[in-house]
Image (cartoon, rainbow, N blue to C red):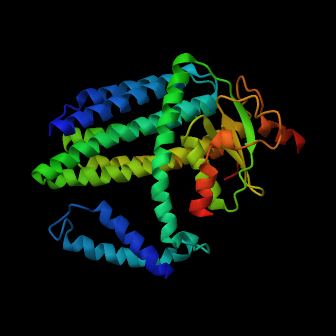
């Protein structure tokens, strides 16, 4: 049995480093890029949490989170480039 | 058992290393496009390896003890992996195009064919 | 034919997502029945959207080529990550946005090439010219030799990926 807690903490530290870029980053495109990166890491962290707590529902949440964050990225990108909806 | 644990630790090491490289690359690179390089490639690769470690572990427990919940974690992790791979690359494409259309210039760029096209029109 | 393929794919997706729910070989009886009903509904509603007019991807040889393609793709992805890690640590970049014309015919191969070169060494697709299928690529470390002549040679930029895209979806 592997102790998964250090892995989860390391992923959380990565997310915190990226969140600094979300807050200071110059301009909307940089913030969008950093936020999308954080979303990817949240998905990975959820999958790790699923095997750590032995709850399979976390992986389902991760799948839905990945697809919803993809939709969010597309819509914000469309907004940034100035399209009409 | 021991072999599976070793393989999992190696996967976790690779995954965490590339995730950290991606996170630091967001701070060290000068503009949106180079940051997208670091963000997309490194975090996708790192997350793939983290999820692969989870798949290896849960498949090992599933084969050994036959627990149903581990099989669910194993199969659904594969689905999450495919979803990540497809959505990350497409999202990077959308973000790069949006950044260029909103007037973001590539820093320290030698040539910019796309800007030349817009001037011609 | 279209209805059948869409329904089978929908049923397979439903079965993957409900694995481990019961006793009939990992699935429960209720999930199997409900999944079949929803697969028929999805197939009836979406058969023209899911496959469209282009029946080219039904050929199993293309799927086999796609599976073979995953190995060089994964190798190139590992190389790309080591390359980016090197550039993050040393900070040595020399970027440019270049236009390449990989001579692809249809939309699906352009999609596949753009996705592939986003994940592989040194390149990131930025925009596409819809009529001529030319790609604008952000290249992180340019080679000055390539920049001299205007219809740029795409081989040093994206390697053999256009050939693979042509073989799989062309």
Position of the N terminus of chain B by quadrant: top left
Of residues A79 and A10, the one drawn nearer to the viewer in this rendering: A10
Residue at 12% over, 49% down:
B64
- Image position, residue A27 (x, y; %): 64, 28
Position of the C terminus of chain B by quadrant: top right
Of residues A69 and B26, the one drawn nearer to the viewer in this rendering: B26
Of residues B8 and C131, the one drawn nearer to the viewer in this rendering: B8
User: Quadrant location of residue B43?
Assistant: top left
- Image position, residue C144 (x, y; %): 75, 28
User: Quadrant location of residue A49?
Assistant: top left
Q: Is residue A67 above or below residue C93?
A: below
Residue at 29% over, 54% down:
B75
Which residue is at the far right? B120
Q: Is residue A35 visible?
A: no
Q: Is residue C130 above or below residue C51?
A: above
- Image position, residue C137 (x, y; %): 68, 40
- Image position, residue B25 (x, y; %): 52, 24
Residue at 36% over, 46% down:
A62
Q: Is residue B113 left or right of residue B3?
A: right
């Amino acid at each position: 049995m592997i102790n998964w807690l250090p892995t989860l903490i390391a992923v959380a530290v990565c997310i915190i480093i990226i969140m600094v870029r979300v807050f200071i980053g110059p301009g909307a495109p940089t913030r969008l890029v950093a936020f999308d990166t954080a979303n990817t890491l949240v998905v990975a962290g959820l999958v790790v949490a699923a095997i750590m707590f032995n709850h399979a529902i976390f992986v389902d949440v991760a799948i839905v989170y990945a697809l919803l964050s993809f939709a969010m990225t597309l819509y914000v990108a469309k907004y940034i480039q100035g399209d009409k909806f | 058992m021991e072999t599976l644990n070793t393989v999992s630790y190696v996967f976790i090491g690779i995954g965490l290393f590339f995730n950290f490289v991606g996170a630091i690359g967001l701070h060290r690179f000068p503009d949106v496009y180079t940051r997208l390089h670091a963000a997309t490639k490194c975090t996708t690769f790192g997350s793939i390896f983290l999820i692969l470690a989870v798949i290896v572990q849960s498949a090992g427990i599933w084969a050994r003890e036959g627990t149903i919940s581990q099989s669910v974690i194993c199969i659904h992790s594969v689905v999450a992996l495919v979803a990540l791979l497809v959505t990350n690359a497409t999202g990077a494409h959308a973000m790069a195009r949006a950044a260029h259309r909103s007037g973001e210039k590539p820093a320290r760029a030698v040539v910019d064919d796309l800007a030349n096209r817009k001037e011609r029109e | 034919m279209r209805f059948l393929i869409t329904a089978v794919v929908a049923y397979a997706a439903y079965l993957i997502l409900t694995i481990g729910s019961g006793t009939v070989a990992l699935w429960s009886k209720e999930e199997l029945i409900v999944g079949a009903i929803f697969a028929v509904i999805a197939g009836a509603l979406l058969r023209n959207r899911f496959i469209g007019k282009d029946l080219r991807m039904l050929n199993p040889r293309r799927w086999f080529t796609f599976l073979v393609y995953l190995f060089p793709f994964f190798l190139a992805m590992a190389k790309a990550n080591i390359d980016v890690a090197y550039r993050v640590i040393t900070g040595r970049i020399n970027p440019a946005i270049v236009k390449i014309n990989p001579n692809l015919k249809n939309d699906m191969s352009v999609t596949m090439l753009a996705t592939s070169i986003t994940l592989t060494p040194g390149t990131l697709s930025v925009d596409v010219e819809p009529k001529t299928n030319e790609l604008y690529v952000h290249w992180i470390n340019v080679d000055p030799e390539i920049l001299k002549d205007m219809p740029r040679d795409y081989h040093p930029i994206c390697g053999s990926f256009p050939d693979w895209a042509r073989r799989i979806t062309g």
